[in-house]
């Protein structure tokens, strides 16, 4: 994969996107375009996750034990808008990782604006700018455009990675891609071998 190539599509409500974000950060650091999208729009319905399997996969990756946030009553719209704004100002990856960790390592509710401000502070986003941009029509339009682009590209489940002309949708496919790239990198860069994922 070329430097900077590819897109990672995620929804902050998804624990599988959290696992993918942590894995991609280590196994695929050259993937620098992370885009928040509405998972509900991808498959027109409420998504549920197999908690025990997610917890086992998180443990296998060496992550802290998952602490489940409250089940969102609806889409985490403000969180997705905040992530969209963060991407626009060059802090998208840092914000997404901070927000994911608050939700799934800390068990925090991302529908609480204070939690978004803490994630913003972790990547040096001014709180007033974050709140203002998260309620702007421009940010709404950017989130909508990102979601439409994912749908047009054939993304039907998250997490998703588009790279090298290929589409990898769902945790199993993204995990397999990262494992393959990590293993290929370990063969060409022996100093990286043995790292835990």
Image (cartoon, helix red, strand yellow):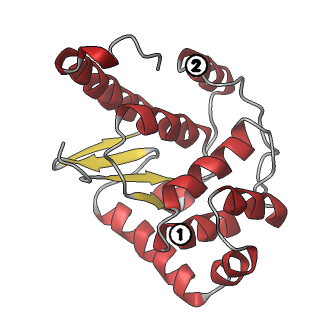
Image point (80%, 39%), residue name:
107
Name which quarter of the figure residue 94 lies in. Answer: bottom right
In the picture, residue 128 is in which quadrant? Answer: bottom right
How far is mark 2 from mark 1, CA to CA?
Answer: 28 Å
Q: Position of residue 75 (x, y in %)?
A: 67, 61
View extreme (bottom): residue: 137
| Mark 2 lies on residue | 62
Q: Is residue 181 visible?
A: yes
| Residue 55 location, quadrant | top right
Left or right of 69? Residue 51 is left
Q: Which residue is mark 1?
A: 84
> Could you tell me which residue is drawn at 27 percent across and 23 percent down?
180
Q: Residue at x 74, y 73 (%)?
A: 127
x, y (%) of residue 139?
A: 55, 81
Q: Position of residue 102 (x, y in %)?
A: 73, 45
Placement of 158 over or under 75, stated as above or below: above
Task: Identify the residue at horizontal 68%, vertical 82% (top origin).
Answer: 135
């Amino acid at each position: 994969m070329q430097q900077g190539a590819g897109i990672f599509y995620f929804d902050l409500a998804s624990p599988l996107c959290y696992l993918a974000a942590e894995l991609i950060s280590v196994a695929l650091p050259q993937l620098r375009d992370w885009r928040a999208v509405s998972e509900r729009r991808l498959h027109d319905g409420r998504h549920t996750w197999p908690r025990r399997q997610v917890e086992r996969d998180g443990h296998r990756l060496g992550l802290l034990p998952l602490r489940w946030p409250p089940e969102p009553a609806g889409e985490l719209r403000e969180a997705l808008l905040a992530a969209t704004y963060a991407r626009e100002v060059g802090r998208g990856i840092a914000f997404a990782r901070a927000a994911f960790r608050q939700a799934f390592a800390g068990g925090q509710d991302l529908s609480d604006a204070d939690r978004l401000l803490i994630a913003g502070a972790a990547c040096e986003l001014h709180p007033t700018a974050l709140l203002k941009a998260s309620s702007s029509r421009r940010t709404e339009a950017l989130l909508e455009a990102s979601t439409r682009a994912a749908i047009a590209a054939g993304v039907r489940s998250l997490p998703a990675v588009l790279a090298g002309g290929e589409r990898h949708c769902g945790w199993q496919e993204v995990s397999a891609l990262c494992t393959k790239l990590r293993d290929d990198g370990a063969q060409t860069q022996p100093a990286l071998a043995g790292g835990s994922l």
